[in-house]
């Protein structure tokens, strides 16, 4: 009920949306720097990237096929690493910029496609949590209103009982001052019963 309202900075809101593009752009830039430093047409460097990318893809396959359906986060990380190494290898080995840019566009599109799935799941979970919170808040508010009405009713009954007792005492006192009053007759007739607060 007393939840803090925290307004997130626009950079914090935008960071997850630009992270896939920043990641693939960083790999492309590093691959082109590697190309400028002697990786162009280097068979050894290309073989190294092929081995590393294949190893990361194999680790992703093992993580996917693991017991109980595997670890999705580990598999996704391994496959993303494999794709990044393949992109870096092509960016470092290729002559021109057209093939690395084409692979960069494809890698960015795939990264956004995968991220969109997680963003949608996260948004659905957030909406479901907010709905449950609203329902829970309404239930608690209803219970509070019912208890408030019950306590007010009990207070009113208690006040009425006190007022009735005061009026009865005043009536008995006034009757006692009248001439010819017989208190024994009143005792024989019995006093009216006072209501209890639980009634």
Image (cartoon, rainbow, N blue to C red):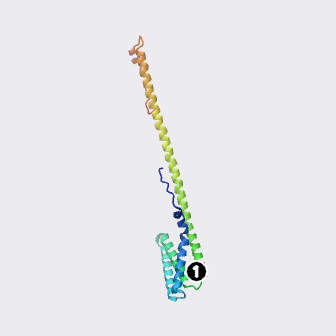
Q: Is 60 or 148 nearer to us in this picture?
A: 148
Residue 55, horizontal then vertical, whole percent: 48, 80
Q: Quick check: can you spot residue 73?
A: yes
Indicate left or right for 15 with 175 as reference. Answer: right
Q: How crowded is mark 1: few (under 14 residues within 10 Å), some or many (20 or more)?
A: many
Residue 40, horizontal then vertical, whole percent: 54, 87
Residue 93, horizontal then vertical, whole percent: 55, 85
110 above or below 154? Answer: below
Q: Quick check: can you spot residue 70?
A: no
141 above or below 131? Answer: above
Residue that numbered label 1 is attached to: 100
Question: At 54% across and 57% down in the image, what residue appears?
Answer: 128
Element assignment for label 1: helix
Residue 26, horizontal then vertical, whole percent: 53, 75
* Residue sticking out furthest to the top: 180
Number of numbered discs: 1
Q: Is 159 or 182 nearer to us in this picture?
A: 159
71 above or below 159? Answer: below
193 above or below 151? Answer: above
* Residue sticking out furthest to the left: 184
């Amino acid at each position: 009920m007393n939840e803090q309202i925290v307004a997130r900075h626009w950079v914090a809101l935008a960071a997850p949306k630009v992270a896939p593009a920043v990641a693939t752009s960083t790999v492309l830039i590093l691959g082109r720097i590697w190309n400028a430093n002697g990786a162009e047409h280097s068979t050894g460097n290309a073989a190294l990237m092929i081995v590393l990318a294949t190893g990361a893809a194999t680790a992703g396959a093992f993580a996917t096929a693991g017991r109980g359906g595997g670890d999705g986060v580990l598999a996704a990380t391994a496959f993303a690493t494999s794709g990044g190494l393949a992109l870096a290898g092509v960016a470092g080995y290729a002559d021109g910029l057209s093939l690395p840019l084409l692979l960069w566009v494809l890698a960015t599109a795939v990264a956004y496609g995968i991220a969109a799935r997680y963003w949608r799941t996260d948004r659905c979970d957030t909406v479901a949590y907010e709905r449950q919170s609203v329902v829970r808040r309404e239930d608690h508010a209803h219970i509070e209103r019912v208890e408030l009405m019950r306590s007010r009713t009990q207070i009113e009954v208690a006040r009425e009982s006190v007022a009735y007792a005061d009026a009865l005492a005043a009536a008995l006192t006034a009757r006692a001052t009248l001439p010819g009053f017989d208190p024994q007759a009143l005792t024989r007739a019995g006093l009216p019963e006072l209501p209890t607060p639980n009634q």
